[in-house]
Image (tube, rainbow, N blue to C red):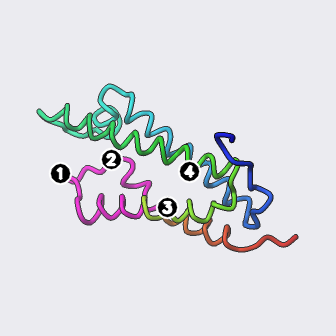
Amino acid sequence: MAFLPPSTNDQYRGSIASVWFLGLAAVLTLVPGLIHSFLPDGGAQVIAHLDVGDRAGLVRAVFAWEGATQIALGLGMLAVAVRYRPLTPLFLALVIVERGLMALDGWVLLPPAGGHHPPEHYASPVAVALAAAFLVLAMKARSR
């Protein structure tokens, strides 16, 4: 038994642009995951310019935890874009859920004190809109 089952790319009938978008989303998930996991402050101060006060250790731990989940999700997205394209609509829907919840938290439920939003708060609503558009394209069969 192989680690990965055979590719199913020949069964995908949606837009190839959706696959490319999913691949880009994978990279844009992996890079922050690596930053959160391996940058000394997880990117909290260096990138997001967050004032962590006397809770730097806690913030770093939370950022590392998020980085681990981003790396796992990004690798899954990349596997779909490269080898299992029929799962593209499912993974685009997951991007919509993840980024939608991030936008909801960042802008409505848990807006940052002081009004400073890290870069991801701006990117998440854009990612939701783009993923929704590419999901529609992924669900529409290509003409042969």
Picture disc at residue 38: none
Instruction: Indicate which disc, 3 or 1, sits on the residue closer to the N terminus.
Output: 3
The three-letter code of the residue at mark 2 reads: Pro
Is 105 magenta? The answer is yes
Instruction: Indicate which disc, 2 or 4, sits on the residue closer to the N terminus.
Output: 4
Kindly report which numbered mark, 4 or 1, lies closer to the viewer in this rendering.
Answer: 4
The three-letter code of the residue at mark 1 reads: Gly
The three-letter code of the residue at mark 4 reads: Ala
Picture disc at residue 118: 2
Q: CA distance from mark 2 to mark 1?
A: 12 Å
Q: CA distance from mark 3 to mark 1?
A: 31 Å
Instruction: Indicate which disc, 2 or 3, sits on the residue closer to the N terminus.
Output: 3
Which residue range is magenta in the image? Answer: 99-126
Instruction: Identify residue for label 4.
Output: 25
Instruction: Identify residue for label 3.
Output: 94
Instruction: Indicate which disc, 4 or 1, sits on the residue closer to the N terminus.
Output: 4
Q: Residues within 10 Å of mark 3 (few under 14, many from 20)?
A: some
Q: Is residue 79 above or below residue 17?
A: above
Residue 56 spot, x, y in % from top left: 19, 32
- Residue appearing at x 35%, y 36% in the figure: 47
Residue 100 spot, x, y in % from top left: 41, 64
Instruction: Identify residue for label 1.
Output: 114
Residue 61 is left or right of residue 33, and the answer is left
Kindly report which numbered mark, 3 or 1, lies closer to the viewer in this rendering.
Answer: 3
